[in-house]
Amino acid sequence: MLGAGIMGSALAINLARRGLEVTLFDREAAPMAATSRWNEGKIHLGYLYGADPTTATAEHILPGSLRFGDLARELVGDLDGHITADDDLYLLHRDSVVGADTMRAKFEAISGLIRRHPDAGRYLVDVSDPLVTELTPAELSEVAGAGIVAGFRVPERSVDTRWFADRLAGAVAAESGVTLRLGTTVAAAEPVDSADGRWRVRTGDDDEHFDLIVNALWNGRLPVDTTAGLTPQGPWNHRYRLCVFIRTRSEHDVPSAIVAVGPFGDVKNYNGRDFYLSWYPVGLVAEGAELELNAPALPTGPDAEAFVGDVRAALERVIPGVSRVFDDADDTIVHGGFVFAQSRGGALDDPRSGLHRRDRYGVERRGAYYSVDTGKYSTAPWSASRLAAEIAG
Ligand SMILES: Cc1cc2nc3c(=O)[nH]c(=O)nc-3n(C[C@H](O)[C@H](O)[C@H](O)COP(=O)(O)OP(=O)(O)OC[C@H]3O[C@@H](n4cnc5c(N)ncnc54)[C@H](O)[C@@H]3O)c2cc1C
């Protein structure tokens, strides 16, 4: 198993529980140390992809997101207290790539899809009759600042990713059928004789042989696929996004809110004291269409402070309440992660950008070698559980 993010760790646990011996490789010193730790953790129902001209993204994401809670509990136990308590607010910006009418219609279509889905009652809250309500002008003026023209309350929830990362890292380390090979960079995966036979993993000067390999390396996936004889099918786009993670001294009721649809930002309030804050144009620090994007150096000292100041200034304009979070920060971390999308990319303020949809991810296979594009955190436990059934079943 290559890659100990949410996909690799969940899959390793699933396979071990089905009786397989799993060796889990990662270049980091601990599982769940990369993108799966440093993201927002929204368990998407599809509403964010309001600029997808179809409902393909929602349809692709829903089955996995609706089962996130069940499957995550099987992996790490109870999630109580680590899921956002309230609905997310979608604040429509006047420069959004879709207008309010399109957004209303798209939200209605997505709610219809959810309502008809047999697993709608199994989401983190019951969404068998999902209710999207538009904020009244008075409600909107309470939360929204400059440039916000409408607001919607959407029944999506998010998981506190750092808490979940600690729990999943603990679970995979405790799983008796899983051997961790940390601090180990994977250079290649090659068939020993034929693609249907045994495979070798090359790490530096070493090789080890396995009955099968799953590549869940996310940003590092394509170079290893190439060595395995799977030619990546373009176009694709890698981005590296920096965000701010704040723990406050006291509790704040700042709502979880996202400014949509386009290159804006959001605030996520996990439990009153732990917050995720991002402003896309400031946080997008690297982008490319090569096989692998190098991780940019994380800002430290005055650079980190300047970054936090920029995110704050941009967010405060549209969601003035976030100033309370910055003012009361006890612990502030600037970190980030990779986004891989099977798309040509393009700017988020372009309504035709392929980044407005995310319906082309999944598993490719060559003999006993599997390559998994996780796509979204939301669907990873579900994809892992299905792939484990396919492999072990
Ligand atoms: C800022 C941000 C916000 C996001 N918000 C959301 C959200 O709200 N909801 C959502 O569903 N998704 C979100 N995402 C996407 C989500 O985080 C990813 O889809 C998901 O975490 C990917 O999981 P993974 O296990 O595939 O990757 P990772 O967690 O990155 O795991 C891959 C592992 O492979 C290791 N690795 C890579 N190359 C090598 C190599 N050559 N050798 C050894 N090890 C290697 C890495 O160290 C890493 O541990 C967000 C992403 C970002 C960056």
Image: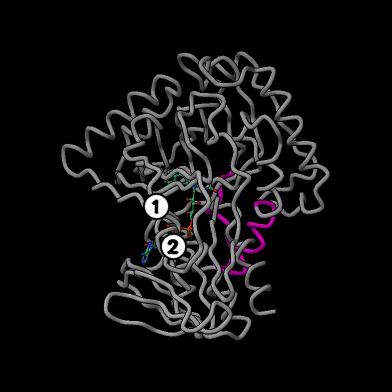
Q: Is mark 1 within 8 Å of ligand 1?
A: no
Please tell me which residue lies in front, 126 or 218.
218
Q: Which residues are magenta?
A: 65-85
Q: How is the image coloured?
A: one colour
Dot 2: element: helix
Residue 211 vertical placement versus 138 (above, below) = below
- Does 66 lie within the magenta span? yes
**Crowding at label 1, few (<14), some or many (≥20) Cα neighbours within 10 Å?**
some
- For the question of whether residue 232 can be seen, the reply is yes
Residue 376 vertical placement versus 223 (above, below) = above
Residue 296 vertical placement versus 322 (above, below) = below
For ligand 1, which image quadrant applies? bottom left
Residue 371, x across and y down, in percent = 53, 64
Please tell me which residue lies in front, 389 or 212.
212
Q: Quadrant of residue 196?
A: bottom right
Q: Which residue is mark 2?
A: 226
Q: Residue furthest left?
A: 302
Q: Do the numbered discs 2 and 1 sit on residues whose CB atoms are within 8 Å?
A: yes
Q: Which amino acid does the dot numbered 1 rest on?
A: Leu
Residue 157, x across and y down, in percent = 60, 44
Residue at point 43% right, 73% down?
189
Residue 253, x across and y down, in percent = 49, 35
Q: Which amino acid does the dot numbered 2 rest on?
A: Thr
Image quadrant holding the C terminus, namely bottom right
Q: Which residue is mark 1?
A: 291
